[in-house]
Image (cartoon, rainbow, N blue to C red):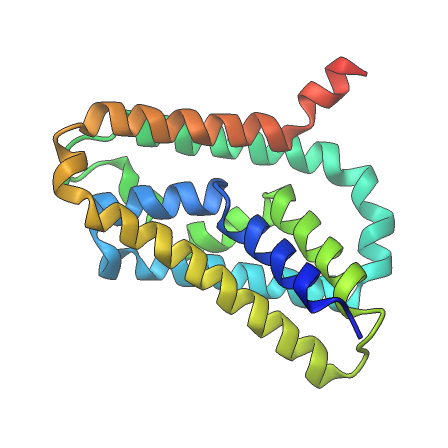
Amino acid sequence: MPNFIAFISYVFVVTFSPGPNNIIAMTNGNKFGFRKTLNFLLGIVSGFFIILLLSNYFNLVLFALLPKIKFIMGIIGAIYMTYLAVIIIKSRETGRKDDTATLNSYYTGILLQFINPKAMLFGITVTSNFIIPYYKSNIYLISFSLLLAFIGFISVAGWALFGEFFKKFLSSYRRPFNWAMGALLIYSAISISGVLEYILK
């Protein structure tokens, strides 16, 4: 039996802490409202669920391959996240049509998972430490993937609701808010890129 307290603690800390998914979810919730952000949130959850399933079924292969592709994935992910950060920083007032509409789509939500090493590493870590050693049957692997995807949905939905809830307040500070969210996303991009680790070796 896995240590469920350690399992839940790890899952909630990683899932609810600021990261690309949560930052963009909050930005979209603030700009478009929760209901119009739902497609993006479902895209995140779909991509996350696929990664969790793959991590369960191909854990050993992924674990062996990830160190070789992590740096390349990190660079690609960092470039994409920086691009998203620039869109957020340049976006205008709520309700005006601009490039941020591209951030608020189902496909952007899915794509973000497959270029986000944090999501990949989370999937591999949580499955290799808490699931695979104890459970092997399909029903358990699928159930745990659904549970973790659901927790992921609660996280991004919470961040999106936070963005919508403070819409009136944040609309008065649209420019600083966009810059803060863009800066956080750039920080996430630098963190996952692995560039600092490579330079500081």
Indicate the quadrant where residue 153 lies: bottom left
Q: In the displayed structure, would residue 94 be above or below residue 48?
A: above
Depth check, front residue: 119 or 133: 133
Q: Is residue 196 left or right of residue 16?
A: right
Locate residue 159, reporting x and y percent. Answer: 36, 50
In this picture, residue 170 sits left or right of residue 137? left
Query: How many numbered circles does the render carry?
Result: 0
Q: Position of residue 18 (x, y in %)?
A: 47, 41
Image coordinates of residue 42 in percent, x first then y, are 41, 63
Q: Is residue 61 visible?
A: yes
Residue at image position (51%, 50%) is 111
Q: Position of residue 131 (x, y in %)?
A: 76, 69
Task: Please indicate whether residue 146 sits to the left or right of residue 184 in the image.
Answer: right
Say which of 15 and 190 sits in front: 15
Please tell me which residue lies in front, 35 or 103: 35
Q: Is residue 140 left or right of residue 66?
A: left
